[in-house]
Amino acid sequence: MKQTNENQEKELFWADQLAEKIINRKKFHYIDKKVPKFDVFTVKTSASLSGVLHIGRLSDTIRGESAYRALKDAKIKAKLIWVAEDMDPLRKVPKNVPKDFEKYIGMAVTDVPDPDGNYKSYADRFKSEYFEVLDEFVTTKMEKFSMREEYKKGKFNKYIKKILERAEEIREIQNKYRTNKLSKGFIPWKPICDNCGKIVTTKVKEISNGVVKYQCKDYEFETRTAKGCGHKGENDPLKGNGKLLWKSEWAAQWAHWKVIAEGAGKEYQVPNSAFWINAEIVERVLSFPMPEPIFYEHLMIDGEKMSASLGNVVYPKDWLEIGPAELLKFFYNKRLMKTRSFSWKDLSKLYDDYDTHMDVFLGKVELDNKKEEQHMKRLFEISCGKEINPAGITFSHATMVAQIGPTEEDMIRSMEKTGHYDKKMHNAIFERINKAKVWLEKYAPEDVKFIVQEDVPKGLKLSSKEKEALHLVVKALHEKKWNEKTLFEEFYNICKKVEVKNTDFFRAAYNVLLNKDRGPKLAPFILALGKEKVIELFEKV
């Protein structure tokens, strides 16, 4: 297929590459069979409700939406669905949940009660909290499903029946990738114990005339044990009181919703992972073509995996306090297979990167490398949409302004001095300033925070050359009007004239103004603070 240069450029972006691959796919992966024609291309995303729904859980949905948008931009009829994996067992009790909830470990999260009694279940609580902010991050109208409800309604019955009928074949597929082989009689079904209500503890013994016989026994997680009750019972898989094992359930989901693409963490790339096992099962057993995978790196916080026990969990609502949803989408979409390590202290850098891409997208900046320019535009477009409202101020400048004056009027005056205030962009500017305030209060490193001094700090000792340099700054501020560039250059002229080291000069200035060795960029800071205040303090040294 001949393509235009524009399309070739767009293919640099991973979502467009994926869309092209999906559209042009002709055959199954494991068997010699043609891919059917789809009326609608379905992109699936999901979240397990067995743990905290932090921003890492959003990554799957955000990337799924990007794939969906790429298909739509290619003029393909598509839809995005979200599935709650609410049949997953409770594995551990989060910090904010009563200790006695240990007794529910091993029970499907949809059957665990809400700790506060405000929701039907533990799963409903997390879903509700998640959905409160999910639409901020995903603007596409998604169809949302619950695995518990799908099983109850019998939506999966035909797949359950086929999978159980061909359990031996599924066992053989799995054993190709296992060192510890599954034994004959393997049944890929997990009933819910009709005595204690746990799902992870039921061990299937046999299946006869479509009825599964099981016994409820202890199940060992990595760090804790789900206690079985010892009950021996029978379970009809078509009655909805249980679930398929994951290494067949995922395949059933793909066939049921006719999924053509789904995200998965990088660990699923390996040939023996659940993704590829399910891919083979869905093609050989359920006669549906495996979806195209969207493999990605997981999010790290300061180089560590998010964990409630480590206290580094970032909730979606936390993110929205310090940044727009588009900033996180941009962060996730930038590179799929590059480690996404986030640090609160580097938030300004992320904002700067985001703003740079925005300027390229809006045509304010042109690059010599046109392929890179097109890639940056496409990344920003697919993350943020086409209607962009610039902030009018950088995040680092916002953090400086937020600390200079306590009132809105003070901040406006400060920005007017440096040419950063535009009345027409008032709301956008202060939206960013307000997010900077939250960041300063909750997350910013100490070296970013400052308090403008009312007087020269007591006990401050400066060399004669440092004092002379500061007095020359006073003289320069009296003589003419400066901008950031010319004032910055003047600092170096003064240092050269007085024969003082640049580092000593800047440290001296920050010590007088802030009682700290470091601070925001000195030239814009002085202009924002106002020459009167600076002159007052520098004259006193």
Image: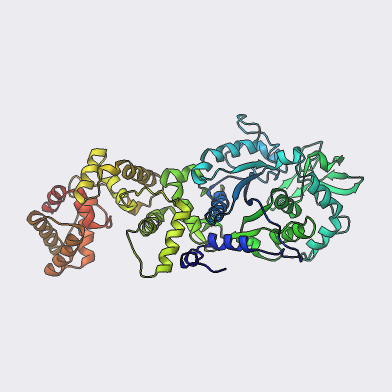
Give the quarter of the image for residue 26. bottom right
Q: Position of residue 433 (x, y in %)?
A: 33, 45
* Horizontal relation, residue 263 to residue 138: left or right: right
| Quadrant housing the C terminus | bottom left
373 and 404: which is toward the camera? 373
- The mark total stands at 0
* Horizontal relation, residue 334 to residue 286: left or right: left
33 and 97: which is toward the camera? 33
The answer to whether residue 414 is visible is yes
Outermost top residue: 117
Residue at 60%, 48% (x, y): give it: 79
Outermost front residue: 2
Q: Position of residue 212 (x, y in %)?
A: 87, 45
444 and 134: which is toward the camera? 134
Q: Position of residue 344 (x, y in %)?
A: 43, 52
* Horizontal relation, residue 25 to residue 444: left or right: right
The answer to whether residue 458 is visible is no
Q: Position of residue 316 (x, y in %)?
A: 50, 44
| Quadrant housing the N terminus | bottom right
Outermost right residue: 209
417 and 102: which is toward the camera? 417
Q: Identify the colour scheme used.
A: rainbow
Give the quarter of the image for residue 129. top right
